Image (spheres, rainbow, N blue to C red):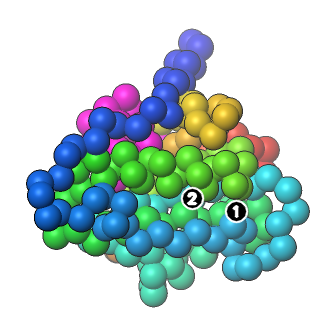
């Protein structure tokens, strides 16, 4: 039985929602941190993987960042082969469509800079910002499914998985995430 073809994801952002008067524009509510490549290593060409963490309520810091670093090491990725984009939503309410469109634009810019061969989308907000409803309504239903994302002037393989902050002591989620990361290695021949 042939594997299903990946869905093509358009890079057009989600239609923005007009904020009410006095509300800061969505871009003003994002804190962005970009590590290309990881750990300040010298870049030696295009990235193999850009990890994308669009966050609200979860942070890729402290113990969660340590877990992420262990995941990257277990994938046998050199720091020069991987990058991390963290976009943290600082608004009081869940990011709306306009905010996710801004996150999408941030990922396009990071992908243009790092030229990754694959994107790993950590968590539901990363998935929604990059794939909208085309990947599925929930991370539970969509994680582990490969898509082809059209953006930054080319096609990039992308997969959504659990955010490291969602793993905790949940062995099932940890196992699922490891399977997803192994599939990244297999797709890239690492």
Q: Seen in the image, is 168 located left or right of residue 3?
A: left
- Report helix, strand or loop for mark 1: strand
Examine the rendered structure and indicate whether residue 146 appears above or below residue 63.
above
Q: Let me know if residue 129 is in the magenta part.
A: yes
In front of the other: 173 or 129: 129
Position above or below: 176 against 131: below
Nearest to the observer: residue 129 or residue 99: 99
Give the extent of the magenta segment: 125-144
Residue 91 located left or right of residue 112: left
Say which element carries label 2. Answer: strand
Contact, mark 2 vs mark 1 (Cβ under 8 Å): yes
State left or right for residue 77 relative to residue 168. Answer: right
Q: Is residue 53 magenta?
A: no
Q: Quadrant of residue 91?
A: bottom left
Q: CA distance from mark 2 to mark 1?
A: 7 Å
**Residue indicated by mark 1:** 82
User: Would you name the residue on which mark 2 appears?
Assistant: 51
Q: Residue at x 53, y 82 (%)?
A: 66
Q: Position of residue 53 (x, y in %)?
A: 45, 61
Q: Position of residue 184 (x, y in %)?
A: 64, 47
**Rendered residue at 21%/43% (across/down):** 17
Instruction: Please tell me in which quadrant of the rendered image residue 16 appears.
Output: top left
The x, y position of residue 60, in whole percent, is: 44, 75
């Amino acid at each position: 039985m042939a594997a299903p073809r990946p869905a093509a994801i358009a890079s057009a952002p989600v239609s923005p929602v007009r904020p009410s008067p006095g509300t800061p524009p969505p871009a003003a509510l994002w804190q962005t941190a970009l590590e290309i490549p990881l750990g300040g290593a010298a870049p030696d060409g295009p990235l193999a993987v850009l990890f994308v963490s669009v966050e609200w309520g979860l942070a890729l810091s402290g113990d969660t960042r340590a877990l992420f670093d262990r995941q990257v090491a277990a994938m046998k990725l050199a720091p020069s082969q991987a990058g991390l984009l963290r976009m943290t939503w600082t608004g009081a309410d869940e990011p709306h469509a306009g905010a996710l469109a801004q996150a999408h634009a941030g990922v396009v810019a990071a992908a243009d800079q790092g030229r990754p061969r694959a994107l790993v989308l950590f968590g539901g907000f990363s998935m929604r910002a990059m794939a909208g409803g085309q990947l599925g309504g929930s991370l539970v239903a969509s994680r582990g499914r490969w898509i082809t994302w059209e953006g930054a002037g080319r096609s990039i393989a992308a997969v959504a998985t659990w955010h490291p902050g969602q793993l905790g002591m949940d062995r099932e989620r940890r196992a699922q995430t490891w399977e997803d990361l192994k599939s990244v290695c297999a797709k890239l021949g690492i």
